[in-house]
Amino acid sequence: MRHLIYAAALIATPAVAGVEEAVNDYILPHLAAFTEAAEVLDDAAQESCEAEGLVGPYNAAFDGWMAVADVRLGPSEQGALSLSFWPDKRGFTERTLADLISNKDPVVEDQAAFEEISIAARGFFALERMLYDSQFNDYAEGDYACTLVRALTRDVVDQATALQAQWNDFAPLLLDPGSAGNTTYLDEAEAQRAIYTQILSALEFTKDTRLGRPLGEVARARPTRAEAWRSGRSLTQSVLATEAAVGLAEALADWELPETRAALDAVREQAETITDPSFQNIGDLMKRLDVEILQQKIDAVENAVEVEVGTRYGITPGFNSSDGD
């Protein structure tokens, strides 16, 4: 296995209530699992670059990424952008990929150089275009596009490995706040609040962006603004992101979260009523309503987390996760 051993970060530091579990039992293991899934995807691409055969490994790797995609903390604050550049409001991914292919840019032959290209042509959404978009996925072994796909999958592995290593270095700051030289987190409350912020931010992003963007206005739905709609993952993205937020909340708390768990179950039940996982039918008012109800169910998860986790840590409901205050 090429992946790093996340246990390297399990250093002997004073325990911080909830933070230790969030880091050592949730974030680091899921980063390791994502790296393994990325390796499987890359191995498959190096063996055969054809789109049809990469669909399964691609979705498995994307699933793995969603467990940690919304933890925009420490090394993930910027590093996540080149793995999941979305929303792409101006169509940069399509244009950048088209330019690479039309020019047969030799950057795909140099992995170090490839890491310096625009983030719009890296990560899961660039790969989605190459695997699912008819403008890009009609290629064969030996084509330039084939080499590009292999560069993309190798880049995902490299990014996953780097992110995992960076988290191994960053974790002690969360685990030992207030220690000598730790100016990032001055006390236990700051470390707890930093992780709590990520939980609420993830739920808000899912409600407002993953679901809100395609919903648009009642009279003007915008289904092609849904996240990963070409691969039919729009619903999956929202459910996995909500499950990840709850998983992190459960790790941060050292007590049961029955209301949060019940709210998550309601999200899953509502997701079962949505017939098009890509949200392309939400111009139909009844189909739109199903997605709006899903949005409400995710809002209920956020409310439950605020009550069951936030208040126990002295963070009152209504806490603004966008600025950490």
Image (tube, rainbow, N blue to C red):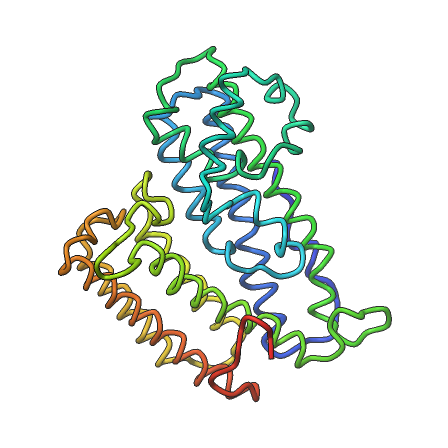
Question: Residue at the location (59% across, 43% down)?
Answer: 160
Q: Is residue 1 visible?
A: no
Viewer-proximal residue among 201 and 95: 95
Q: Which image quarter: residue 14? A: bottom right
Q: Can residue 17 be seen in this view?
A: yes
Question: Residue at the location (48% across, 49% down)?
Answer: 65
Dividing the image into 4 quarters, which one contains the C terminus? bottom right
Residue 314 in picture, x, y percent from top left: 57, 89
Viewer-proximal residue among 134 and 54: 134
Residue 97 in picture, x, y percent from top left: 49, 28
Residue 156 in picture, x, y percent from top left: 55, 37
Rendered position, 197 above or below 90: below
Rendered position, 188 above or below 203: below
Residue placed furthest toward the front = 219
Rendered position, 293 above or below 44: below
Rendered position, 38 above or below 200: above
Q: Is residue 316 left or right of residue 182?
A: left
